[in-house]
Image: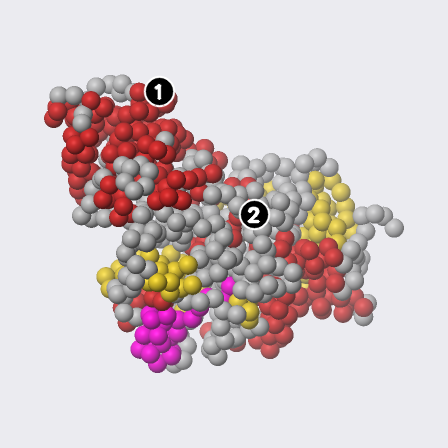
């Protein structure tokens, strides 16, 4: 047997790829995980994780050089002096924006699991039934009962801290002890919960930061430097969690600098026999063979791999027979909400930097509420005291001014809504025929926009925030809508959706490509709708579920 | 969550759009200072003293103690776009010209009381201008100097550990810690 032959291939090493590798190897499959970018070692690779503010040359602001080098990243918070190496080299890997699209990519081992927001929420049947109920796009081929045990499975391993609330739209999970709300958040939450008779609830965020030691990882130290990589392993990432578990089986090979250019499709067996890899450093091409292929390259790149595969059979690529590959691109639209001030807490402060905030789960178009748009949104937010960067209206310069800034300022609280985006067939990412990347590979042309339903929702996202903060007792509440560009939610979903019918979907109910059933796509590409919750936990659960099915089908010789 | 929070330091004048810098360029002699010359001894000294007038030593070190002049020069060189660089370097001349008109000597020649008086007035002017200005209008040079002074000071080692409370590894969270007037703010959020 060739040394390039494995039982399973995993494309991508982010949240989904890491889970695929862990589950496959723990079930005994000899697996290779292919990552297009460099390796970042757990702990030793986190070069900025222990730096003090004064150790950054520009004190965490942006140089003109950084702005020039990162025309897309600079559009948002992601561009930072502290973890510049964690984000894609945009010059090497361009894409085309048919309409403005923020694509914030992490091309390295761990992918965006290193920098993710860590908010982890279950979906409910409110979400899995949504498309069928509303007559939008296609029905999800699964329901909550299908995924529920897998949510438990991944939560127990990843370590999700949270509070059990008994909310029908946000099922409870297997939680580690919840983080604590601060004094202002507690009072605002109590007032909101009372005012809305528990139809609207403010709860502590559910986050993949561990609040007690868990699986040989040290609990969160409240440094709030997660996005630099955590030397304590305080949050879930590929490096802290799934990769060591997969490595411990002795069955995993990790190959960085491996750009999968195509899945090798065998017309006779109607299955994939492996993948073609372009070594990003040497430009050499290799082939790897396996019984199953897990495509976990992230929503847009998973679609890209499929589009480049089996083009002799299907010109638009493997999985394109439905006409849906690359289509139905979704995200969460956000950046609108409200801020207010809390009075009467001058004798209170906080200790520690909590890498988590509060959450207000969806209350629109649920519990009998009916709006002039479909679906809904949730809020994330927090209360804190102002720091030295605040303006002091009555002071200018000098010693008194300086000493005033050494003390904390007012308590303020803000919430930002994250709204569901509907799946529109015409929101798409397809191969661009002209533009090529550094390796001569075609790039994606991304063409997506939010529409009337989302714009109507944004009116509520802003107005409801103001109303709730005011009912929560905050003063001087102001609203904001700082504008949303598609992709900025960094929750890309939907380019290879699951469904009941090969005519209208790319994947079946087990995340298998209809046209090649030993190929599984288990990242955000598989999503048939976007929900209003942060999606990563659902990718984890779907991945573990798909691996279980794949191994069972292999044993039955069905694939 | 925390990744969604805006970069909540000062609203820094870095890559901001500027349509025209004419407002601050007009009436000036042809730019007498180049950005690289900000690193000259005399300019570092000037910026040190401007910074130290904004944030002087009190019970805690002042801006000069954290070498604010070199920090400002570095930030203007690396982080400001050409328009803002021009506003800043012209500001050096404008500030000195203003002092000459009012006190018959340049900024460094002024007494501490004069410096404080002058920069207090300049800050009032800057605040009023900034609050009324349209987004596309240029920034005021003294807002730049003040922002860079605050940023450089409160993120410096002495600023973080002496003027503020710096705690690299809190280890736990208490959302209702007692606070009394005079207790210092945390250095990092």
Q: Which mark is residue A106?
A: 2
Label 1 – label 2 distance at C-alpha: 41 Å
Could you tell me residue B68's position as x and y percent?
Answer: 34, 32
Residue A455 visible in the displayed image: no
Is A204 part of what is drawn in magenta? Answer: yes
Seen at 27% across and 43% down, the residue is: A402
Residues drawn in magenta = A186-208
SS of the residue under disc 1: loop
Q: Quadrant of residue A503?
A: bottom right
Seen at 46% across and 47% down, the residue is: A78
Q: Which mark is residue A331?
A: none
Could you tell me residue A396's position as x and y percent?
Answer: 20, 42
Query: Disc 1 or disc 2, which is closer to the eye?
Result: 1
Chain bearing tag 2 is A
Q: Are marks 1 and 2 on the same chain?
A: no
In the foreground, A132 or A65: A65
Q: Quadrant of residue A241?
A: bottom right
Seen at 27% across and 69% down, the residue is: A473
Residue that carries the numbered disc 1 in the rendered image: B40
Residue A43 visible in the displayed image: yes
Could you tell me residue A43's position as x and y percent?
Answer: 61, 48
Residue A45 versus residue A182 in the image, above or below: above
Q: Residues within 10 Å of mark 1 (few under 14, many from 20)?
A: few
């Amino acid at each position: 047997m060739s040394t390039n032959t494995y039982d399973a291939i995993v494309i991508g090493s982010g949240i989904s790829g890491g889970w695929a590798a862990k589950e496959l190897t723990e079930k005994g499959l000899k697996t290779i995980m292919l990552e297009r970018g460099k390796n970042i070692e757990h702990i030793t690779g986190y070069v900025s994780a222990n730096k003090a503010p004064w150790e950054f040359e520009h004190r965490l602001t942006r140089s003109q050089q950084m702005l020039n080098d990162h025309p897309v990243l600079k559009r948002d918070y992601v561009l930072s002096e502290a973890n510049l190496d964690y984000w894609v080299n945009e010059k090497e890997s361009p894409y085309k924006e048919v309409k403005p699209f923020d694509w914030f990519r992490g091309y390295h081992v761990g992918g965006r699991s290193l920098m993710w927001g860590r908010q982890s929420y279950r979906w409910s049947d409110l979400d899995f039934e949504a498309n069928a109920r509303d007559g939008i796009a296609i029905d999800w081929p699964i329901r909550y009962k299908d995924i529920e045990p897998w949510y438990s499975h991944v939560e127990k391993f990843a370590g999700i801290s949270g509070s059990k609330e008994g909310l029908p739209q946000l099922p409870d999970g297997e939680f580690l002890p919840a983080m604590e709300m601060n004094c202002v958040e507690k009072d605002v939450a109590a007032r909101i919960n009372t005012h809305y008779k528990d139809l609207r609830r403010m709860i502590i965020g559910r986050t993949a930061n561990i609040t007690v030691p868990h699986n040989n990882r040290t609990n969160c130290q409240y440094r709030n430097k997660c996005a630099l990589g955590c030397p304590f392993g305080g949050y879930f990432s590929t490096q802290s969690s799934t990769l060591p578990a997969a490595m411990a089986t002795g069955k995993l090979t990790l190959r960085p600098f491996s750009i999968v250019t195509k899945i090798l499709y065998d017309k006779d067996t109607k299955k994939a026999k492996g993948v073609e890899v372009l070594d990003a450093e040497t430009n050499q091409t290799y082939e790897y063979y396996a019984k199953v292929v897990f495509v976990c390259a992230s929503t847009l790149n998973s679609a890209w791999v499929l589009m480049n595969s089996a083009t002799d059979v299907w010109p638009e690529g493997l999985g394109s027979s439905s006409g849906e590959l690359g289509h139905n691109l979704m995200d969460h639209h956000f950046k609108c909400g409200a801020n207010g001030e809390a009075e009467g807490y001058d004798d209170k402060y906080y200790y520690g930097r909590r890498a988590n905030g509060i959450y207000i789960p969806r209350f629109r178009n649920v519990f009998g509420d009916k709006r002039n748009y479909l679906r809904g949104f949730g809020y994330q937010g927090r209360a804190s005291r102002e720091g030295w960067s605040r303006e002091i209206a009555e002071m200018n310069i000098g010693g008194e001014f300086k000493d005033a800034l050494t003390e904390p300022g007012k308590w303020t609280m803000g919430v930002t809504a994250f709204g569901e985006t509907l799946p529109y067939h015409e929101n798409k990412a397809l191969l661009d025929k002209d533009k090529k990347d550094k390796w001569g590979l075609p790039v994606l042309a991304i063409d997506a926009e939010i529409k009337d339903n989302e714009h109507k929702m944004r009116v509520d996202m802003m107005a409801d925030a103001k109303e709730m903060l005011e009912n929560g007792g905050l003063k001087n509440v102001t609203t904001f809508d700082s504008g949303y560009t598609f992709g900025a939610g960094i929750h890309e979903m939907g380019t290879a959706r699951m469904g009941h019918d090969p005519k209208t979907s790319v994947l079946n109910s087990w995340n298998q490509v209809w046209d090649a059933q030993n190929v599984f796509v288990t990242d955000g590409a598989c999503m048939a709708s976007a929900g209003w919750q942060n999606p990563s936990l659902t990718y984890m659960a779907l991945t573990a579920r798909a691996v279980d099915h794949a191994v069972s089908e292999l044993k039955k010789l069905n694939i | 969550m925390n990744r969604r929070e805006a970069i909540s330091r000062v609203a820094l004048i870095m890559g901001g759009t500027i349509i025209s810098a004419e407002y601050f360029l007009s009436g000036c002699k042809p730019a007498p200072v180049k950005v690289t010359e900000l690193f000259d001894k005399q300019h570092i000294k000037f910026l040190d003293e401007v910074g130290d007038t904004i944030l002087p030593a009190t019970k805690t070190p002042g801006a000069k103690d954290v070498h604010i002049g070199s920090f400002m020069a570095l930030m203007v060189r690396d982080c400001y776009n050409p328009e803002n660089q021009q506003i800043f370097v012209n500001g050096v001349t404008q500030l000195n010209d203003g002092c000459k008109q009012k006190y018959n000597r340049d900024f460094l020649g002024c007494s501490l009381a004069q410096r404080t008086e002058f920069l207090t007035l300049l800050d009032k002017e800057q605040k009023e201008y900034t609050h009324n200005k349209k987004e596309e209008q240029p920034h005021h040079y003294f807002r730049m100097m003040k922002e860079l002074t605050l940023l450089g000071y409160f993120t410096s080692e002495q600023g973080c550990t002496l003027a503020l409370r710096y705690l690299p590894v809190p280890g736990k969270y208490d959302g209702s810690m007692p606070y009394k007037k005079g207790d210092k703010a945390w250095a990092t959020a």
